[in-house]
Image: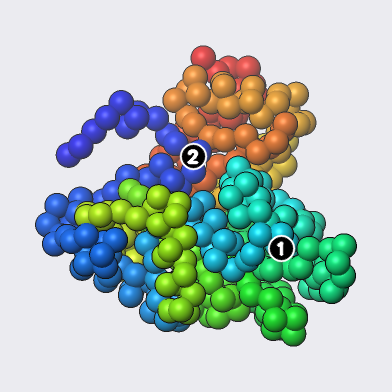
Amino acid sequence: MLTDMADKKVDFRSDTVTRPTPKMRRAMYETEVGDDVYGEDPAVNKLEEKAADLLGKEAGLFVTSGTQGNLISVLTHTLPGQEVILESESHIFYYEAAGAALIGGVQMRTIPGKRGAMNPSKVEAAIRSDDIHFPSTGLIALENTHNRAGGAVIPLSNMAALATIARKHAIPIHLDGARIFNAAVASGTTAKEIASYADSISFCLSKGLCAPVGSVIVGRKEWIDKARKWRKRLGGGMRQAGILAAAGIVALEQMIRRLPEDHALAQYLAEGLAELPEVDVVLPETNIVLMNVEKSGLTAKQLLQRLEDEDILATDFGPFTVRLVTHKDVDRTGADRLLDAVKNIFKGEAR
């Protein structure tokens, strides 16, 4: 069994910290590989076909990360000088280093949402008219689940309304579906149903699905062919990438069905935190818990430092908000360690 110094820590920072399963490692070792830039890697081809089938699209493209998948998608859908409408706290706007503006020359038009969901009437009002003073609207981008909204699931009714508006104005929709399978599990539907409201979707293999590297984007075959060229331009063409894709195949075949465990643990964690008078917490829909600790007199960073002294890791999401993400590599024991540590910190009894 592989171990490292991190094994003693309880890591709630993100579901990106998950490590590949033994079956993934075995598949990575045993898989047949080829040169993917030439389209000759059988594992990559299988992964892309499987991903496209799961989401009801014609083709898929294996990319290095969710950020690269979103950037490729924006660049493929838009032209320099156009504008992208997206939610004001979305990952593309908040965490992707302005890549679309820097590389693609596109502008972001942000719409404040409610738990990550944009009001369809406000989105339609933001679509630019044909005027020489304005950029044209080239894309509407959605995120489901929504990270900064605490893993909130965007309702299908909201996505359907936005899709109707997009078709009316002949504007494509891209879905940042990094955790689309969490959204499907939580809403009792399928990833294919969620994906049906978007022209392209990116999703992560390296978050709750536990693969070590990679994301996949899916869409129409003609669109994916164009996206493949953008992947090449960005230096994302990998060679014997089947070693990585093999883990992604295992992720899609075996790891989606265990996501309810992460959701249940997040619920348990949130319910325990809600009992503390120093904490305000919203009960989660998926695997992300946001707790506000302003009433404790501590900032988020101060609490995180004291938790780290207890070998517990988490992330700040603002001056007083801490984000906790559940995943395969944390369990009820880890959650109890966190709850006990937070209680002791507030009591002044932590080491």
Look at the image and tell me whether residue 343 can be seen. yes
Q: Position of residue 211 (x, y in %)?
A: 33, 53
| Residue 234: assigned label | none
| Cα–Cα gap, marks 1 and 2 | 38 Å
Residue in the image at 70% along x and 81% along y: 170
* Amino acid type assigned to the residue bearing label 2 in the image: Phe
Which residue, given by chain and number where applicable, does mark 1 sit on? 82
| Residue 12: assigned label | 2
Q: Position of residue 122 (x, y in %)?
A: 84, 68
| Mark 1 nearby-residue class (10 Å; few <14, some 14–19, many ≥20) | some
Task: Give residue 71's quadrant in the image.
Answer: bottom right
| Mark 2 nearby-residue class (10 Å; few <14, some 14–19, many ≥20) | many
Q: State which quarter of the image contains the N terminus.
A: top left
| CB under 8 Å between discs 1 and 2 | no
Could you tell me which secondary element the residue under label 1 belongs to? Answer: loop
For discs 1 and 2, the disc positioned in front in the rendered view: 1
